[in-house]
Amino acid sequence: MDTIAYGIANQIPATYVAPEGWNAKSALPVTYYYAAQSTLDDGTVLVTGGIVPGGATANVLSYDPATNAWTAKTALSIGRYYHGQSTLDDGTVLVTGGMQYGGIQMNAVDSYSPVTNSWTAKTSLSATRYLFGQSTLANGTALVTGGFVGGSSYPSSDVQTYSRVTNSWTTKTALPQNRARQTQSTLDDGTALASAGVVGGGSQTSSVVSYSLATNAWTTKASLNGNHYQHAQSTMADGTALVTGGYKNGTPTADVQSYSRVTNSWTTKVALPQTLMGQAQSSLADGTAIVTGGLGPGNSPTADVQQYEPGGTYTIAGRAELLGYLAAN
């Protein structure tokens, strides 16, 4: 018995290779597209607004990855879509701009408190804005970039930051070129990555730019593999940015790409289960990402929810020490 226990105790710990891929989760209560989404400090995901059967909605939903369940929260004051959303450093959620039903453009800004499950109106954007980029910077301010501003049908280069401390907006260095329909997320070094969309007078682009708060300047980064718009983006726990779906070179795509700021390069990842556009996306602390709703094949609205697993190799703690101890005692 001692010889057997000694042999077991000296086994090499096993490793497990977790596959990269997508897993279906509990669907949204109804189909949603052009909603906004961010992850809260408690790990739940907050989805606001969007288009549901019947038009623009004020509905707010919370997804709990631990229970794989959806819960209705206090609704927005008015239905909106094409809006921006990010979670601030105090745990509140800032929702900005967008459109109301009938294409009415908005500059309204609202803040959601998960503690009180309530909304508070904040200082409005200086002009109406929709289809823009938004993410929260390391200093707690929200960075809003480009989009269609002030009723213009041309993309804007305007950049603003919102301070919750002063409840005010500040103009920052403009984008290198006019841009709308881009996606945006803040990376682990505090820079914000704005990816693809349409530029100039509306030309589709694969170009990517990065904003540094420290220098208040923009830097060109490696381009996506193909022009993209109506895609989604979030920063993963490992610091990479995950871009999913949208239109790629004018065609609906299931394409998924990952950006590394360390190598300034993009890597193709496992594709979505189907083509998807206008979806919402955010990343969780466990290294996964949640993608909700959107327009599937044939531009059909969907209620699907998918979780992206990046995969990897993990060491499984063996029973060697325990078995050795039990055998010796």
Image (cartoon, rainbow, N blue to C red):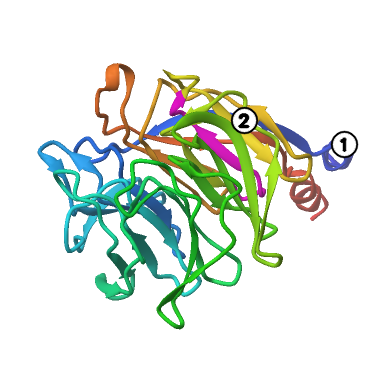
Check the picture and name the quadrant holding the C terminus.
bottom right
In the picture of the structure, the residue carrying the numbered disc 2 is 224
Relative height, residue 289 to residue 257 (above, below): below
Q: 21 or 182: nearer the eye?
A: 182
Give residue 256's position: percent from left, percent from top: 54, 28
In terms of depth relative to the viewer, which is nearer, 74 or 131? 131
Q: Residue at x 43, y 29 (%)?
A: 246
For badge 1, the amino acid type reads: Gly
Q: Is residue 156 left or right of residue 177?
A: left
Q: Residues within 10 Å of mark 1 (few under 14, many from 20)?
A: few
Q: Hey, what amino acid is under mark 2?
A: Leu
The residue tagged 1 is: 7
Marked residue nearer the N-terminal end (2 or 1): 1
SS label for mark 2: loop
Decide if residue 239 is on the left or right side of residue 63.
right
Q: Residue at x 42, y 54 (%)?
A: 38
Quadrant position of residue 223: top right
CA gap between label 2 and label 1 equals 52 Å
Mark 2 or mark 1, which is nearer to you?
A: 2
Q: Which mark is residue 111?
A: none
Residue 45 can be seen in this image = no
The one nearer the camera, 250 or 33, is: 250
Furthest residue in direction left, as rendered: 54
Magenta stretch in the rendered image: 236-247
